[in-house]
Every structure is written in C-alpha cells, then in structure tokens.
C-alpha cells in the first residue's frame, strides 16, 4: 500500500505520517516512511540536495527547484519506495509532486504543464497512483501560529525559503492546495484539532 500525506507548512504532515507508521507497525506490517524533501534523510546525497532547496539565502530559480526536488523524489522512490512495495510492504510519504505543482508552479510561476511533463518522464506510473492521498488543511490563523514556533534540528524551519514569505503568499499557497483537492479528488483532513483527533480522522479511512 502506498500512502501520501500532503498539506501546507504547519499542518502536521510529518507528525500524522509518523503516527500512521506506528499504527501499521503495531499490526506487524513492514512500513517505510520518508519525506520527499529529504531534510530528515539518512542518505548523504539526498541531504545535500535538500540543503540546496531549503537554504533560506539560496538564489535559486524556481525551475531549478523543480529539478532539484525531482532528483530527491526519484532517488528516494527508487531506493525506498519501490523495494518496499515489491515486497508487499507499506510506503508512507510526506509530500509528493503536488507540492511542486503548488509551490513552484501555482505560486512560483513555473508552467504546470512543464512540471507535469518532467515528472511524467522521470517518475514511474505507480508514483502517481497512491492508494490514499490525504491533504491536511488549517485555518490561516492557526497555520501562522504553528509556523511561528516550528523548529528542526537541521534547519530553522521558519527561515526556509518558502516559509520566509509573508502572509499573502501563504494565502496563495492555501488556495493552491484547495485547487489540488478539487482537481485531483483527494481526501481533505481538517488539521485544526489536537494531534490525536486529527489522527482518528485519518485512521477512519483504513
């Protein structure tokens, strides 16, 4: 089974994906969980690409970001996801190509047809057909509150390139996610509640 957990920054994607991983592991199932951005990867190459993408002072064109994210997307898919799926395990991925459609495409000005073309060229068909795709959403005030306190042991998350953008930009990102939910008919999860409350909503789909 292949599961994607998507959503704007601050919605709790990683927290919910980890809880889902623990839920399936408790049932004795083999589970692999990773974040496509690569910030928490143990793979040295993936981490180096992530540093280029998430550095707050990197003057990188958005087309370049599309390609850099695609590199990490493909590398982790072939090294982690494909072997696990072939063995009948469960793959839980935080973010997928929707993030690039929204951040670099809808908000960054890169042609979404170009983004689609390069991804369809590189990524296998299975990648585009998760068994479940969840998009976590938040009220704007709650999201701003969470972004203000986020931190990470490798990067200061609130200083990342996209997170350093102002409130109007964050509103545009939220609209992008609303478009994705509508256009791709994925599962929207209201993430405004407590962690366990949100997880119960996700768990109800299994």
Image (cartoon, rainbow, N blue to C red):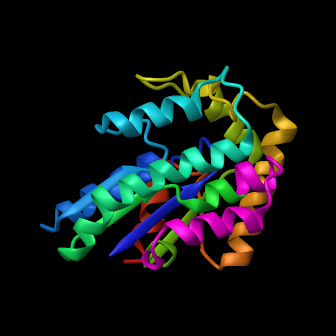
Question: In the depicted view, which residue is nearer to us: 146 or 62?
Answer: 62
Is residue 27 or residue 116 the one in the foreground? Answer: 116
Residue 161 sits above or below residue 29 on the image: above
Q: What predominant SS class does the magenta segment belong to?
A: helix
Name the residue rendered at 73%, 75% in the picture: 182
Q: How many marks?
A: 0
Most foreground residue, 54 or 184 = 54
Q: Say whether residue 40 is visible.
A: no
Quadrant for the C terminus, please: bottom left
Residue 67 in percent (x, y) is at 60, 49
Residue 131: x, y in percent?
43, 79
Q: Residue at x 74, y 37 (%)?
A: 61
Q: Position of residue 154 (x, y in %)?
A: 43, 23
Nearer-the-camera pick, 38 or 27: 38
Q: Is residue 89 visible?
A: yes
In percent of width and height, residue 165 lies at 77, 31
Residue 199 figure quarter:
bottom left
Horizontal side of 203 relative to 140 (left or right) equals left
Residue found at the very far right of the displayed protein: 168
Residue 113 on the magenta segment: yes
- Is 15 on the left or on the right of 180, as rendered? left
Residue 107 included in the magenta stretch of the image:
yes
What is the magenta range? 102-126
* Quarter in which the N terminus is drawn: bottom left
Q: In which quarter of the image is residue 150?
A: top right
The residue shown at (61%, 34%) is: 146
């Amino acid at each position: 089974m292949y599961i994607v957990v998507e959503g704007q920054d601050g919605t709790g994607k990683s927290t919910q994906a980890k809880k889902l991983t623990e839920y399936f592991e408790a049932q004795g199932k083999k589970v692999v969980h990773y974040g496509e951005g690569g910030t928490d990867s143990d793979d040295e190459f993936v981490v180096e690409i992530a540093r280029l993408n998430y550095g707050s002072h990197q003057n990188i064109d958005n087309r370049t970001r599309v390609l850099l994210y695609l590199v990490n997307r493909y590398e982790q898919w072939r090294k982690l996801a494909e072997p696990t799926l072939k063995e009948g395990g469960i793959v839980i991925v935080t973010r997928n190509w929707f993030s690039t459609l929204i951040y670099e495409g809808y908000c960054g000005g890169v042609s979404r047809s170009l983004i689609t073309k390069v991804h369809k060229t590189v990524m296998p068909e299975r990648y585009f057909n998760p068994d479940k795709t969840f998009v976590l959403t938040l009220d704007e005030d709650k999201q701003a509150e969470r972004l203000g306190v986020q931190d990470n042991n490798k990067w200061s998350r609130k200083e990342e390139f996209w997170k350093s953008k102002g409130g109007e930009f964050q509103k545009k990102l939220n609209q992008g996610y609303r478009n994705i939910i509508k256009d791709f008919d994925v599962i929207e999860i209201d993430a405004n509640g407590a962690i366990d409350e949100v997880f119960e909503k996700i768990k109800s789909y299994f």
